[in-house]
Amino acid sequence: MKIYVTADVHGFYTEFHNALDEAGYFIDPDPHKLIILGDIFDRGTEAVEMQQFILELMEQNAVILIRGNHEDLFAEMITIDEGLPVRHHVSNGTYGTALQLTGYDPTLAQIRHWDFAEKARETPYYQRIIPATIDWYETAHYIFTHGWIPCIRGWDGSYSYDPDWRDTGPEGWRMARWYNGMDAAQSCTEEKTILCGHWHSSYGHSKYEGKGSEFGPDADFSPYYGPGVIALDACTTHSGKVNVIVIEDDDLPDQDAEDERFREVTQRILEEHKAAFVELAK
C-alpha cells in the first residue's frame, strides 16, 4: 500500500492541502493512507478548516494520527492550566488555536478563562481528534512517530537506544515527543527506518550534511534522509512549506489490532506503576 506521510502542519491548512495536492494524494487511484506525525494545530490561522479536514479523513478511515507534543500542550492548557494564557501556550500557538476553534472573544477568554477552557474541551479537536492519536505506528519496514521513540537520555543530552521502547509507558512517550530525532538516530540501532517530525529538517541538512544554515536564506527545509531516519518537519511558520513524502510498504498491520495492542500495553504498565505506588505507601 502507498503511504503519504507528513508532519507538523501546525494549522496551516492551505499549505498542507497544497502539499498533498502536489504529491498526487487527491487523484491517486490506488489504495493509500495518510499518516500525520503529530502537531496538527498551533501557529497557523486555519484551525477551523484543519479540524474539518481531519474529521473528514477520520470518517473515511483514511488517516493515521500520531500524537505530537502540541496535542499534549492543548490538553494541558484546557485542563491543568484552566484556559489561562500561560506564556508558553501563547508563544507555541496553543492559545490561538483554542481561540480559533471556540470563536471566543480574546478579552472575554482571559476574564472567564474557566468557561473558555470548558468551551475548548467541547471542540471536536479535543473530543475526537486527540483521543484518536497514537504514540507510534509500525509497518514491516518503518516506524512512524513524532519526536523519536523512547530512549535513554544521558546527562550530556546524548541518546542511547532502548530495545524495549515498545513497552514504554505514557510518561516516556510524552518525553520522547520532544526529542530531536536526527540527533537520536546517530546512536540508534533500530532495524527499521524511523520517520519523525518535531525538529526542523534544516537542522539535519546543516549539521550532518553541511548544507546551508538552519534558518538563513540558504536553509534547506526539504525532508532529511539520514541513516535510519527520515525527518519531515518543514518549519512551516518559517519556510511556508509542508513536506509530504510517499513510501510503499506491502505489509501493513491491521490498525484495530495495533490500537488494541497499544491499549493493552499501556494498561499493563499503568497497573504495574499503581502496584509500585501501593507498595511504597505501606
Image (tube, helix red, strand yellow):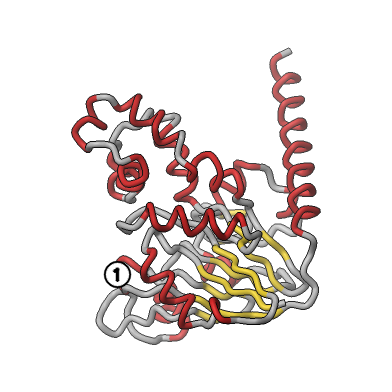
Residue drawn where x is 48% and y is 45% of the image: 125
Image height of 34 relative to 157, above or below: below
- In the rendered structure, the answer to whether residue 172 lies left or right of residue 14 reads right
Q: Position of residue 208 (x, y in %)?
A: 47, 81
Q: Position of residue 129 (x, y in %)?
A: 54, 48
Residue drawn where x is 53% and y is 53% of the image: 55
Q: Residue 258 versus residue 123: which sits nearer the camera?
A: 123
Q: Amino acid at mark 1?
A: His
- In the rendered structure, the answer to whether residue 34 lies left or right of residue 48 reads right
Q: Residue 17 versus residue 276: which sits nearer the camera?
A: 17
Q: Position of residue 205 (x, y in %)?
A: 43, 81
Residue 124 visible? The answer is yes
User: Considering the numbered disc 1 on the image, is that residue within a helix, a strand or a loop?
Assistant: helix
Image height of 39 relative to 106, above or below: below
The image quadrant where one finds the N terminus is: bottom right
Residue drawn where x is 79% and y is 42% of the image: 264
Image height of 133 relative to 87, above or below: below
The image quadrant where one finds the C terminus is: top right
Residue 226 visible? The answer is no
Quarter of the figure with residue 279: top right
Q: Residue 100 versus residue 268: which sits nearer the camera?
A: 100
Residue drawn where x is 37% and y is 75% of the image: 241
Q: Residue 59 versus residue 282: which sits nearer the camera?
A: 59
Extreme-left residue of the structure: 107
Q: What is the count of numbered marks?
A: 1
Q: Position of residue 225 (x, y in %)?
A: 55, 81
- In the rendered structure, the answer to whether residue 80 lies left or right of residue 44 reads right
Image height of 178 relative to 21, above or below: above
> For mark 1, what is the residue?
238
Quarter of the figure with residue 113: top left
How packed mark 1 is, by other alpha carbons closer than 10 Å (few <14, some 14-19, many 20 or more), is few
